[in-house]
Image: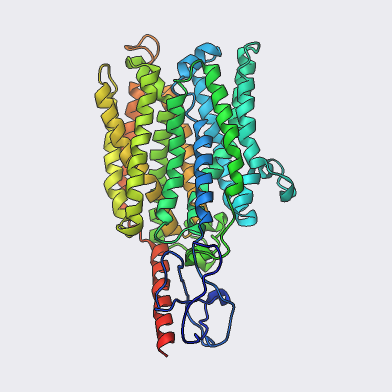
Amino acid sequence: MSDKSIEAESKISQPELAYEDDTKVDTEKDGKTSERNLAVVPVSVPSQAAEPGPEVVYRLYKRRFAGLAALIFLNIVSAMSWPWFGPISNDMATDFDITLDQVNWLGNIVALVYLPTAFLIPQIVTKYGLRRCVRTSYSILLEPNTNIEKYELGAIALILSAWIRYAGTAKTLSGGRAYALLMIGQFFASIAQPIYQVLGPKYSEVWFNLQGRTTATMAIAISNPIGGAVGQLISPLIGSTRQSILVLGIISTAVTPLIFFIANAPPTPPTYAGSKPSPSLMSLLRAMAGKTVPPEAHMSSRERIDFGIMILIFGTLVAASNAFAILTAQIFQPVGYSADVSGFLGACLLLTGIVAAIATAPLFDRVFTHKLALTTKILVPCVAVAWLSLIWAAKPNNEAGLFVVMTLIGICSVTMLPVALELACEVTRNADGSSAILWFTGNLFGVMFILVQGALRADETATPPLNMHRALIFNGSFIIVASLSVFFIRGKQVRKRADEEKLREALENSNSVRLS
């Protein structure tokens, strides 16, 4: 499909239709819109509808797939840094003369820096757009008053993280100095990761129509766990820990030119929601608190309750997965499993979930279009029970049982990612703000889960030594309690209903104009 405007065909001269923001809609010859080329969205017609106004045709562009692919690959690579050291944590502790808790902090630093960065991203998008957010967020974090056109440092954060980390592998460095360089490298990696992760729902809203929005959100959302899975799978297989860090640096450097494929917005938006800027993050926070906000940012009390429940559940499930990625080897090696098997178990959780998400996301776009809330009520209890069962499954000589549990967790939890992100957009009408809050909570809870589970690790005199049984009890119990709130979600899909209603109005108006 060409990016050029597709003019409406008609044997009769059509009068102009007035719309909000002085927009007008073209219609095709038979009075129907082309789903492939156009997505027409009107609003209420004012009394002076006969007055001419500028033309606007809502349509899709092929270039959206280039930006989507770029976000996917950047998300994959930026996500690899967090769990990279999980499967090789024991080897890292030995090679660099550090403790297991210090290895865990190589993951914790990513979550901690993620927290303020996630809240800055919606503000950056509002002011500078998607592309500049991807390319300049690092400069804004360090120099808020810097001229935005002078810097291309978003991708440089990935490159810096790669090679500062590798500098820490020099054998001439003491353990403390090497560890400091590893931490600094992880700091830069933690700036890049939230940029690509938080922007997913906003990119989908701006570039995709109703038949592709959830699928696009799914593709970006699952690319982060794909990166985690790849990181867990590769890191123990490469060789020594130093060689592993080198490979991560090469991959991070190779992917950075993809930022130039990400554009701010199409010349013409694909839907009514895509034509409207998201309310600010501050207005969303005020709406959640019941304060006075502009009409477009208003949330009913029911919507505030729904979003609060989603924050709790999303944060808990993301935290459980993130903590598991960091602690994989520490959970399974004390009960007799190698670093390779630990990596395979973590990868199994994520890869099976990715397959399930790819299979189900198009169904939510085209079949179960108004069933997002029902989906959460089915999947959340299932994943909660699976996490609880890990308490008894993590034992010697139970490899098959562990892979079954990992598969169940992966299918349910990863499938929930795009569903939760899209449902949050529906109840808040704020794509980047709701995404930022959800991911912020997931990472905040993730730090808590890692610290608590690390503190619950058994000592060296236990049987088996350093086992994580008490940590698994905490993990499963917390998830079960938080998941009970899912049954109170109503989850009315306000954004989708508004888009569909305005599309119906467009078709009715175009038909009536043609008949007259």
- Image quarter for residue 470? top left
Vertical comparison of 30 with 381: above or below: below
Vertical comparison of 372 with 496: above or below: above
Colour scheme in the image? rainbow
**Residue 118 drawn at (x, y percent):** 55, 44
**Residue 422 drawn at (x, y percent):** 41, 53
Q: From the viewer's perspective, is 292 left or right of 323?
A: right
Q: Quadrant of the C terminus?
A: bottom left
Q: Nearer the viewer, residue 180 or 305?
A: 180
Q: At x 38% / y 35%, what residue is drawn?
A: 350
**Residue 300 drawn at (x, y percent):** 42, 63
Specify the farthest residue to the bottom: 516
Residue 139 visible from this viewpoint: yes
**Residue 385 drawn at (x, y percent):** 26, 36
Q: At x 63% / y 15%, what residue is drawn?
A: 170
Vertical comparison of 415 with 334: above or below: below
- Image quarter for residue 209? bottom left
Q: Nearer the viewer, residue 512 or 84?
A: 512
Vertical comparison of 287 with 52: above or below: above
Residue 487 visible from this viewpoint: no
Q: At x 40% / y 52%, what residue is drawn?
A: 215
